[in-house]
Structures are given as structure tokens and as C-alpha cells.
Image (spheres, grey):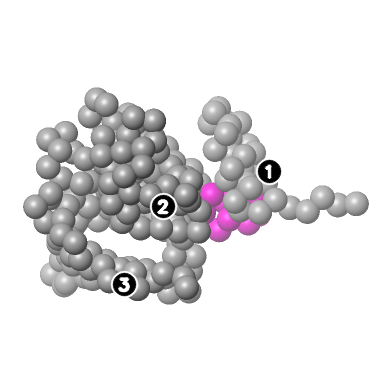
Amino acid sequence: MNRPMPGEDEIFRIARAIADPDARAEYLKSSCGDDTPLHERVQAMLKIELENDSFLEGLPPGLTATSALPLSEESGDTIGHYKLLQKIGSGTNKRKWLPGDHAISTTLESIEQGAKIKSSAISGWDAKRNQLVERWYSSDGLSSTIRYPLDQIKAKTWKGNFTVTFGDGTEFDGDCLLEKNDDGFIWTAKFMKDGKEQVRKSIARRIR
């Protein structure tokens, strides 16, 4: 009886646990076979993990990462000696909190132009503790850094600056706005590319 082929998530889970790059590459080759798009998607997700690990290593002293928080936790609760502040997002199995003295790892899936995009982020305070910094990496090759100055984080609206990096290494700076409401939030970033204004927008709605 033929064994069913492993799915994308299983291939990624096993590959990320293989420390040796050559062994990992061989596993991906045998698992993905001739499915080049699958191979590229898993490689992109692995790159996200590695770059997020590098970001954590560069955080100011005293910052650590927390992910997959139990769904029972609420604002004011503690994890070890860390305190949860304000919830700023949620998903099927993860919540995202405004961090106190720690950084938080977040993952999400979205559909853009009919394609499934997986993204991963590390959030934490900068060294001077006057900005909340998020570094996002997407499986479509885009990466971005978002900075929300402390005085721009309001109850319903956050204003910050935004840097997007394309797969060819080009970077563009712009402004971003996070607008929260009872149904979810809308995140909009605007930047100039080739003399034209570009807009990236993400809309999140709560599942009733």
C-alpha cells in the first residue's frame, strides 16, 4: 500500500527540525519531488524562520520570545515574569499581545489575489523602548519592517513608518496606519515606487 505524500505543513515541520543544511536540502528534494512551487513555498517559510531567529539574537538584552499563548490568557496575566499588556490581534491558535519586556512571534495566513500567503513576524520594543517594532516575512518573498512610535499608539488608531523589501533587494519607505474597530482592523501602508504611489492593505475581521 502506497504511503500518502506528506502535506506542505508536515514537510515544513520536519525540515525545520533538520539542523544540517545539506540534509535539509536532500529531505526537501525527496519530499517535494518535481513539485517546484511546493519546494519554493517551503524554502520561503524556512527562510522566514531563520531570519526571525537572527532578529531575536539581535534584540536588546532581556528580551525573549513567546509564541502560541494559551487561549485562556487575558490582559494583565503573566507568563513567567513577563506581563501581558494589550491584545492587538488573534488567530485560530495564537494571540498577539503588545509586549512588556519581551518579544512575541506571530504567524498568519492570508489570501491575496487568490494565492495563499504565509507570514511570520517578530514584535518587540526597540533598544530605547520608545517604538514598537515588527519585522514581517512573507512566503511570496516580501519582507517589511514596521515601527510604531510610542506616542502614536492610540486606542483605535496606530500611526507608524514602514519599510518594504522586495525579492530583488530593493527597499522603499513609507507611512502606515492601523485602524481598529469592533469588527477587526484595517492596516494600510503607502510608499513610492518608480514615481508612483503604492498601497498595501490588510483587512482582518473577527470570526463570529
The mark closer to the camera, 3 or 1, is 3
Q: Is residue 49 left or right of residue 200?
A: right
Point out the stretch of residues depicted in magenta: 32-42
Circle 3 sits in a helix, a strand or a loop, which is it? Answer: loop
- Sequence order check, earlier mark of 2 and 1: 1
Visible in this render: residue 123?
Answer: no
Confirm or deny contact between disc 3 and disc 2 (CB under 8 A).
no
Q: Nearer the viewer, residue 175 or 104?
A: 104
Q: Which mark is first along the chain, 1 or 3?
A: 1
The answer to whether 123 appears left or right of 71 in the picture is left
- Above or below, comparing residue 51 to residue 142 in the picture: above
Identify the mark nearer the N-term, 3 or 2.
2
User: Amino acid type of disc 3?
Assistant: Asp
Relative placement, left or right, of 9 versus 106 is right
Residue 21: percent from the left, percent from the top? 53, 31
Q: Which residue is mark 1?
A: 30
Which dot marks residue 95? 2
Q: In what element is the residue under mark 1?
A: helix
User: Which quadrant of the structure image shows residue 138?
Assistant: bottom left
Residue 18 seen in render: yes
Disc 2 is placed on an element classified as strand
* The quadrant where residue 52 appears: top left
Kind of residue at disc 2: Arg
The extreme right residue here reads 1
Residue type marked 1: Ser
Binning the other alpha carbons within 10 Å of mark 1 as few (below 14), some (14 to 19) or many (20 upward) gives few
Q: Is residue 14 magenta?
A: no
Q: Which mark is residue 54?
A: none
Using the numbered discs, state the Cα–Cα distance from disc 3 to disc 2 in whole angstroms. 17 Å
Q: Where is residue 154 shown, x and y percent of the image? A: 15, 59
Residue at numbered disc 3: 182
